[in-house]
Amino acid sequence: MSDRIAKQRLVFSELAPAGYYLGLRIRFIAAENEFIMLPPSLVQSYSTQGLALNDPLMRWAFRNSGSVRWKDLAASDPADVLSEYRRHGLSHGAVVSILTENEGPLRSIGIFARNDRDYEEPELSNLQRTLDAWHEPPGLTLTQPQIEALRLLAAGHRYKKIAHILGITESAVKARLKAATRRMEARTPAQALKVAVASGLLHM
């Protein structure tokens, strides 16, 4: 994890002591990166019941930009999804949504929770400023060997086949993909591939 990401996650952890969810650089419905730092019991219940479809927090995030407190969305919660958050100890919170239109719509959303009090205006501004900084990726770069390895991975080849095509060892393939994953600030080679394509570094 880069120093930049570590510092930003520290801000989110301090401002959202009860947990948070981040969906970064979403196109259509797929996020380049996701961080789910919410109680596991809530995540399981939320997923099992399919609450995302009726969640007023998600609905607001995909229809708006800026920030809003959870309490201000209570009137638009006919399915009473917010009570599920409260049941798992998330009593207060905020939603932040960032939307840019540089090369088509690109959105990042954050759902932040506290169990002690509502968010104050300076805290909302801090959350929005931090998410905005994360929404705009840094100047990402890849070397030509890393691009070659990612392209072959995207074509569905296994490491052994990639090594044969490139005339290198399987360990060298793994090293290239590991380096590419680190450069893309991703967690897996597959995620690095997605980030590289979205950033215009890898034309498929």
Image (spheres, helix red, strand yellow):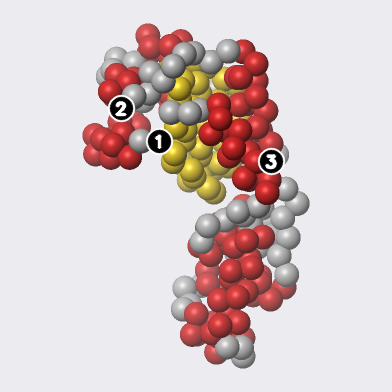
Q: Position of residue 167 (x, y in %)?
A: 61, 90
Depth check: 27 or 190 in front? 190
Which of 154 and 114 lies nearest the eye of the viewer? 114
Q: Which element type, helix, strand or loop, lies under badge 2?
A: loop
Instruction: Left or right? Give the position of 161 relative to 137.
Output: left
Report how many numbered discs are placed on residues in the image: 3
Answer yes or no: is residue 105 visible.
no
Q: Which residue is painted at 64% across and 57% down in the image? A: 184
Q: Amino acid at mark 3?
A: Glu
Q: Can you tell which of label 2 and label 3 is closer to the viewer? A: 2
Q: Position of residue 21 (x, y in %)?
A: 47, 35
Question: Residue 47, position in %: x, y?
Answer: 29, 39
For disc 2, the neighbor class at 10 Å (few under 14, some 14 to 19, many from 20) is some
* Disc on the earlier residue, 2 or 3: 2
Q: Is residue 186 left or right of residue 90?
A: right
* Amino acid carrying mark 2 in the image: His
Task: Using the image as rendered, state which of residue 114 and residue 60 is in the foreground.
Answer: 114
Mark 1 vs mark 2, CA separation in Å: 9 Å
Report the residue at 44% width, 39% height from top.
Answer: 37
Q: Mark 1 or mark 2: name the one nearer the start of the chain.
A: 1
- Which residue reaches farthest right? 139
- Give the labeled residue for mark 1: 38
Q: Label for residue 202?
A: none
Q: Which residue is mark 3?
A: 136
The residue to which callout 2 is attached is: 88
- Determine contact: label 1, label 3, CB under 8 Å: no
Amino acid at dot 1:
Leu
Can you see residue 102? yes
Q: Position of residue 66 (x, y in %)?
A: 60, 21
Quarter of the image where the C terminus is located: bottom right
Q: Is residue 23 above or below residue 197?
A: above
Q: Are marks 2 and 3 in contact (CB under 8 Å)?
A: no
